[in-house]
Amino acid sequence: MSDESKPGWKSIPIAGILLEPGSAMEYKTGDWRAFRPVVDQAKCINCLLCWIYCPDAAIIRREKFVEVNYDYCKGCGICANECPVRPVKAITMVEEKR
Amino acid sequence: MSRIIGLTGNEAIAYAAKQSNVDVVAAYPITPQTVIVEAFSEYVFNGEVGTEFVCVESEHSAMSACIGASLTGTRVFTATSSQGLALMHEMLYIASGLRCPIVMGVVNRALSAPLNIHGDHSDMMGSRDCGWIQIYAENAQEAYDWIIQAFKIAEDSNVLLPLSVNIDGWTIGWTVERVEVLEDDEVTKFLSTRKPVLTIETDKPITVGALCLPDYYFEMKRQQVEALKESYEVIEHVTKEYEALTGKRYGFIETYNVEDAEAGILCLGSTAGTAKAVAKDLRSKGKKVAVIKPWIYRPFPTEEIIKAVENLKALAVLDRACSFGAPYSALCSDITATLYQYRKDLKIFNGIYGLGGRDIRPFDIEAVFNGALEVAKTGVVKEPLKFIGVRE
């Protein structure tokens, strides 16, 4: 399925050339995600293990808990796996609805 | 003013590249390379050209270096043949995908195994979907003329595609012919220098060759389809300009006596020359035969082919390559696909000939013409796929 919000072949530069340097930030990889990490802010102990392990630097530090940058989180689940909170983890993976 | 000199097909291509003021040539210098780059390296050694000549360790690297050079906005030429083109295969797609207007002389020769160094079209036909403009020249003169026109076509801002000019190995590549050449300054004036559109520059950096996922890849391929379509008009324009300069008219196809013919042969390259000679002879005996020779194989000259076969009842398409397991070989598949919508009544058969440099003699061509005339008369194709000149 084609994403109709993206430009068509007539309006993009040829050959996949990127005209501006350092433009990788503009490319949102969040739509690769099949499962999204959901943070229960009440359970989060702010240990920052998820922040350390996230391979995409998609965990945002707040004063008392963490948040997820869904523009870049690819949904790998490492944060939920590493979350030490028990018996119920502070980060759980929930299937994306499309 | 044109001069007449004796050149082999290979030398004619090298001479045309020399006159085209090429900035960079990257090539693998030994077998299966041809005399094209050997002749060109002499021009470099003698200081006759200001070209940067890069000797690389393989054809894969040769095309890679050509791509890099082309992306900086320079005029780039290379040449290869046979296994060399096969080794380039991966990079051919990158050259067209990155829209590098590289011009390459391809001396068509057979692919191994068994090991063979003689002429057939297996090499280029094996890479026919690589997104390049593909031209087949009949003789050394045509090869010379097409190379000069090639740079103008490929480098046009509406095209920006790599282009191969193909000649038959040995038959044309290594045979000396009378070639009319232009003066250097005439070629310089005709081509001027390349005017690149998007290039790698330090002042304004761009990214080339970045990852392109399912959300954009398809759009890039669609652009390439459009570029080949655009090249159609550019080819027409450039061939007209070249006619104004030289008096020689090139186009998408050449036809010989199609107007009132009943049966015809359609083929690429040097075999068309033999076919025209045989057709001339048969005409004198009252047989209504024609020859159709596509110069341009990609973009496929659909409209020209449809018009050329208008009056024909039977058509023999001769392929000098074998698409193993396919109903027809490459050229005939294209022809049948083209004509299915417009000329369902035209009877077509495919002849595979000349593999590994097997000679196709006037006698063989005459038999094909007679076979096509028989089909025109009876309306029945007994053998849709024939092998011409093979021992049973």
Image: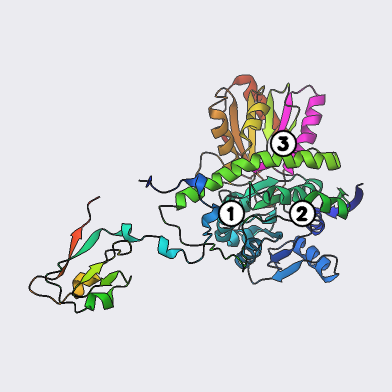
What secondary structure is found at the residue carrying circle 3?
helix
Quadrant of image for the C terminus of chain B: top right
Whether label 1 touches label 2, CB < 8 Å: no
At label 1, the amino acid type is Ser
Residue B87 bears which disc, if any? none
What secondary structure is found at the residue carrying circle 1?
helix
Q: Are marks 1 and 2 on the same chain?
A: yes
What secondary structure is found at the residue carrying circle 2?
loop
* Left or right of residue B275, residue B200 in this image: left
- In the rendered structure, does residue B288 fall within the stretch colored magenta? yes
Residue B173 bears which disc, if any? 2
Given residues B255 and B375, the one toward you in this image is B255
- What residue is shown with label 1? B96
Q: Where residue B149 appears, x then y in whole percent?
A: 75, 47
Q: Where, by quadrant of the figure, is residue A84 drawn?
A: bottom left
Q: Indicate whether B190 appears above or below A46.
A: above
Q: Where residue B160 appears, x then y in whole percent?
A: 63, 51
First along the sequence among labels 2 and 3? 2
Total count of labels: 3
Given residues B130 and B358, the one toward you in this image is B130
Pick out the residue farthest to the left. A87
First along the sequence among labels 1 and 2? 1
Q: Which residues fall within the magenta stretch? A: B269-297
Colour approach in the figure: rainbow
* Left or right of residue B248, residue A96 in this image: left
Given residues B77 and B135, the one toward you in this image is B77
Pick out the residue farthest to the front. A63
Between disc 3 and disc 1, the foreground one is 1
* Left or right of residue B342, residue B13 in this image: right
Given residues B163 and B347, the one toward you in this image is B163
- What residue is shown with label 3? B365
- In the rendered structure, does residue B314 fall within the stretch colored magenta? no
